[in-house]
Image (cartoon, rainbow, N blue to C red):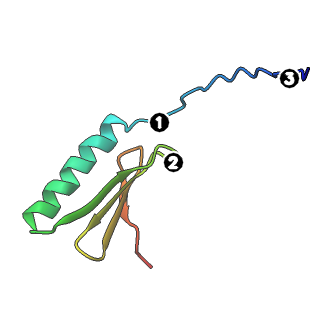
Amino acid sequence: MNLVRLNIIYVTIKENSIYPTTRQALMCVIICQYLSNLYRDIQLFRFSDTTGNVFILAGDELQILVFRDGTWRFANET
């Protein structure tokens, strides 16, 4: 007779998601409005739940980062 020993592991998963701030959300809407007024297609709108930043890709090359405090900058600036 073969005996099988089972090890039971209990895992607790904590969700530590970051959500956009109010200032950040408002600035994203304002930036998207500006881009729309300039007839720029918004190709990608991405919120990073690890950094808390929003990345907006408009057209083929315009990249914008919106930070949690509502400030923003072009991501591809040199």
Q: In this picture, is 59 found above or below 71? A: below
- Compared across the picture, whether 1 is left or right of 15 comes to right
Q: In this picture, is 64 found above or below 12? A: below
Kindly identify which numbered label has been placed on residue 18: 1
Q: Nearer the viewer, residue 10 or 67?
A: 10
The reply to whether the C-beta atoms of the residues labelled 1 and 2 are less than 8 Å apart is yes
Kindly identify which numbered label has been placed on residue 51: 2
- Compared across the picture, whether 58 is left or right of 70 comes to left
Q: Nearer the viewer, residue 45 or 63?
A: 45
Kindly identify which numbered label has been placed on residue 76: none
Mark 2 and mark 3 lie on one chain; the one further toward the N terminus is 3
Q: Residue at 15%, 69% (x, y): give it.
A: 40
**Among the 4 quarters of the image, the one containing residue 7:** top right
Spatial CA distance of label 1 from label 3 is 43 Å
Name the outermost residue toward the front. 1
Q: Residues within 10 Å of mark 3 (few under 14, many from 20)?
A: few
The reply to whether the C-beta atoms of the residues labelled 2 and 3 are less than 8 Å apart is no
Residue ID for mark 3? 4
Spatial CA distance of label 2 from label 3 is 45 Å
Query: From the image, which quarter does the C terminus lie in?
Result: bottom left
Residue type pointed to by label 1: Ile
Residue type pointed to by label 3: Val
Question: In the image, residue 2 lies at what x, y percent?
Answer: 90, 23
Q: How many marks?
A: 3
Spatial CA distance of label 1 from label 2 is 8 Å
Question: In the image, residue 42 lies at what x, y percent?
Answer: 21, 62
Q: Secondary structure at mark 1?
A: loop
